[in-house]
Image (cartoon, coloured by chain):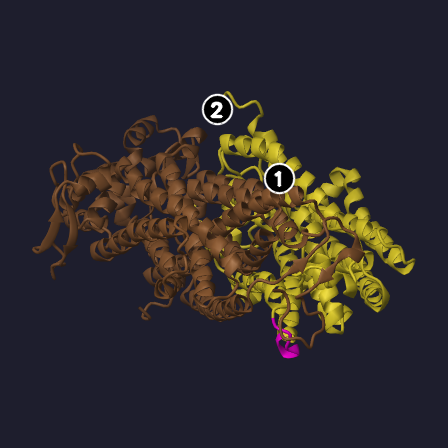
Amino acid sequence: MLASRASSSCEANPAMIDMTVVELSRWQFAATAMYHFIFVPLTLGLSFLMAIMESVYVMTGREVWRKATLFWGTLFGVNFAMGVATGIVMEFQFGMNWSYYSHYVGDVFGAPLAIEGLMAFFLEATFVGLFLFGWDRMSKVGHLVVTWLVALGTNLSALWILIANGWMQNPVGAKFNPDTMRMEVTDFVAVLFNSVAQAKFVHTVSAGYVCGAVFIFAISAFYLARGKHVEIAKRSMVVAASFGLAGALSVVVLGDESGYVATEQQKMKIAALEASYHTEEAPAPWTLFALPEPDGGAPSFAIQIPWVGGLITTRSLDEELLGIDELVAHAETRIRSGMIAYDALQKIRADGTDQAARATFDEHWADLGYGLLLKKYRDDVGNATDAEIALAAKDTVPDVWSLFWSFRVMMGLGFFFIAFFAFWFWKASRGTLESDKNLLWLSFFLLPTPWIAIEAGWFIAEYGRQPWVVEGVLPTFYAASGLNFWDLVISLGFFTTLYTVLFVIMIMLMVRIVKAGPKDHHFAETGDEDDFVVAALPVTPQTKELGA
Amino acid sequence: MSAIPLDYETLRLIWWLLLGVLLIGFAIMGGRDLGVGALLPFAARTDEERRVLLNVVGPTWEGNQVWLVLGGGAIFAAFPPLYAVSFSGFYLAMIVILLALILRPVGFKFRGKISDPRWRQVWDWALFVGGAVPALIFGVAVGNVLLGAPFHFDGSMRAFYTGNFFQLLMPFALLCGLVSLGMIVTQGAAVIVGRTSGLLAERARTHGTLAGLLTVVLFALGGFWVAFGLNGYVITSAVDPSAPINPLNKTVELVRGGWLANFGAHPLMIVAPLLGFAGVIIAVLALQARWRLVPLLAASAGIFGIISTAGLSLFPFLLPSSTMPNAGLTLWDASSSHLTLFIMLLVTVVFLPIVLLYTGYVFRVMRGPVSAASLTKNPNAY
């Protein structure tokens, strides 16, 4: 990997794409996105849970609910800061590391990203300050509205980001324009109501709700197990268990993969998730366990459950599930069509008035991306050999086994969360939350599990889409910037170091906050200065902790 | 396409203006917080003073930074080739900005959680870096835009950037960086003077005065440099402002002082640099006169004038190319499609006023002086 260091070769020969730079760019994007996605789901879940708790406070007027909101709000604040710190990196990285992507699809992809800023992130970021600092400056109801606006902003934010991401999975409502060399929007409504985007949105925010619920539940279980902050802990557990149960049901029932049947590559993703090399007749079985073959072919040993596969992947019993081998054959057909599109495009670029070339291009443009897969093997795509076409077709298969197992980990955890919250919901309704200390401790130690499921889900969605950055439209390797090896080494090195340090500090601070526990803050309802009594906040620099 | 009620040329012009609004919006709003960050270790000496400063901007800085996020998003959505070329071309400079910006949210949030003075000092300097470095580099970037960046395209619109990080640090670009830093520090000082009192406000007054004077002198120097020492880029072929984008479809020449051509053609544009000078000078005078509100308004007007000057000089260029002048990006040949620009405009027309309304509301709720005593009243105070 360290062998090719010259990116200047890019300049000398535009066709030569430095694959080391592509690989490092992918690592950097994956690392920064997965890191950012540690904080996002928790923000999604916590903002809603806090809004619910504060609503109860406003309705009942009971101080304990405000105390709970404030306490979770402190943890929320730390998490939110990390989300903001890592989020801006995401927005800039498309242009920085994926420059050709930004040009090629910016007309479509840029819009939801910009609208996210305008409609959602502005709302979220402006009101989060008021949420944290405005307790003593607003009426009860006023502050409650602010908290709900933060929750609304975070969820709207997820909507627009997933509309953007959904388009990468299922690029509807756009067409390639040979005069501008890029994809352009033809139907914005189709981009908005992209079935994949909608499925992703519901699935992802639900996952966030589960994440927030497990977080609150686990920490509350810790308090209850130690007999501390019992009032807040029990109430938080009731809210978290009910909200978490709803979220867990939704995350499984409205799974992301429901949208995968829409297109060819998503079918490939499904086939990879199922390690299904040959088309299964409907209703397909579901493979619970299988062993990979050393040569990368179909598994010889597998435990299968009849019918379930069809249900999980197609939500039906009569749709067949295409296998990898059949999909590769389809890809080969499309690559050949893509070569025709590519040649026609070259003619149009050379002579914009060539109507025959335009007619040919219009017929084949949808396969242009498949033609670009050949760029890995040769620059003059139109002259590719059968062997190169076969290689490019094989490239459309993502890495089967990492996806197969990630999917099972995610699914297993998804079902586990339903059982977990159903159990505690039942315990809560019987009033026996604290009857078994061991169960409470166990629940505490389950704290990291939602992140395992969530990161596995991200991995499936993004790695499962490979070799495409935009499915069927633009291969990942073709989308990178012409940076050089050392650019990437420097940026990756700095990001990794800084992110690691910040993560350690954040965990340390969260542990301190949790150990310190909820405090009593007595605000006055209005802004009258003399009414304040601060019971818990140390003021002088000598005191150990500031900010509960 | 025929259903779009605004023509392509008008939409491109509107988006050029909106891009200016967003970037100036960030410089004015985000500049408050960057400026306070840059002054943090100097204007505030004790921990208590520093906490006061952090709580002056603490409740509103996150919203202010969205102007930058939105500016980045708008470049992506409205001028994708500009986003693609500039963000990848200025790669390491962008990395430096990002690393500095990352330090800000965590600096605000982490600093107050532990009271060890060494801990707090680390975050004070982190917040200083997070404020001063982006303020400086954004200006350096504008300077490099005026100089032209070394990039070209191949036939498939793939961009190739042939410069490196150190070539960005040309004397003229550094001068622009200092103008940017100066005006943002002035803005920060104006914020501090408006919301605090005593020694803290006194020091900020001094710093703001120095920064303001420096800004004025360097801005004037920059003007002379542009007029007599710098080549501007001038389009020499006919331009169809409604054509599909193709940056290679024009010819460009370098002309000494060419960046002033627009001012010659439209003398009214002189209002922009005059506002830049007047705003900052009035801010300085108002600081000396111990007014509380005027410095901020004047400094904001100064920022508006200075950035507008750069934008108007460049028009219609967004990013000229020094190595292949014909490939330079202009608003006519580097925009999004007609439909995308129109949809984005609809969304902006609806939501930008809403954003301004609730931002105004939040500032109103959080208004008023911040003092050491007021910090004790909120458990979330930084």
Residue A281 position, x and y percent, is 11, 37
Q: Which amino acid does label 1 sit on?
A: Trp
Q: In this view, does A442 lie to the left or right of A336?
A: right
Farthest top residue in view: B3
Range covered by the magenta-colored residues: B114-119
User: What secondary structure is found at the residue carrying circle 2?
Assistant: loop
Residue farthest right in this picture = B289
> Which residue matches tag 1?
B16
Residue placed under numbered mark 2 in the picture: B1
State the residue in front, A396 or A402: A402
Residue A102 horizontal side relative to residue A341, left or right: right
Q: Chain B is drawn in which colour?
A: yellow
- Residue at (90, 60) in percent of width and height: B288
Residue A309 image point, x, y percent: 18, 43
Q: In the rendered view, does A373 fall on the left or right side of B269?
A: left
N-terminal of the two: label 2 or label 1?
A: 2
Whether residue A93 is visible to the viewer of this picture, yes or no, is no
Query: Callout 1: few (<14), some (14-19), or many (20+) C-alpha neighbours within 10 Å?
Result: many
Q: Where is residue A416 in the image (x, y as percent from the top left)?
A: 30, 53
Kindly state the secondary structure of the residue where label 1 is placed: helix
Q: Does the stretch in magenta take in A371?
A: no
- The tint of chain A in the picture is brown
Q: Point out residue A356 in the picture as x, y percentages from the top left corner.
A: 30, 27
- Work out whether B43 lies above or below B354: below
Whether residue A409 appears in this view of the structure is yes
**Left or right: B267 as drawn, with respect to A403:** right
Label 2 to label 1: alpha-carbon separation: 21 Å
Q: Please, what is the three-letter code of the amino acid marked with disc 2?
A: Met
- Disc 2 residue crowd, few under 14, some 14–19, many 20+, Cα 10 Å: few
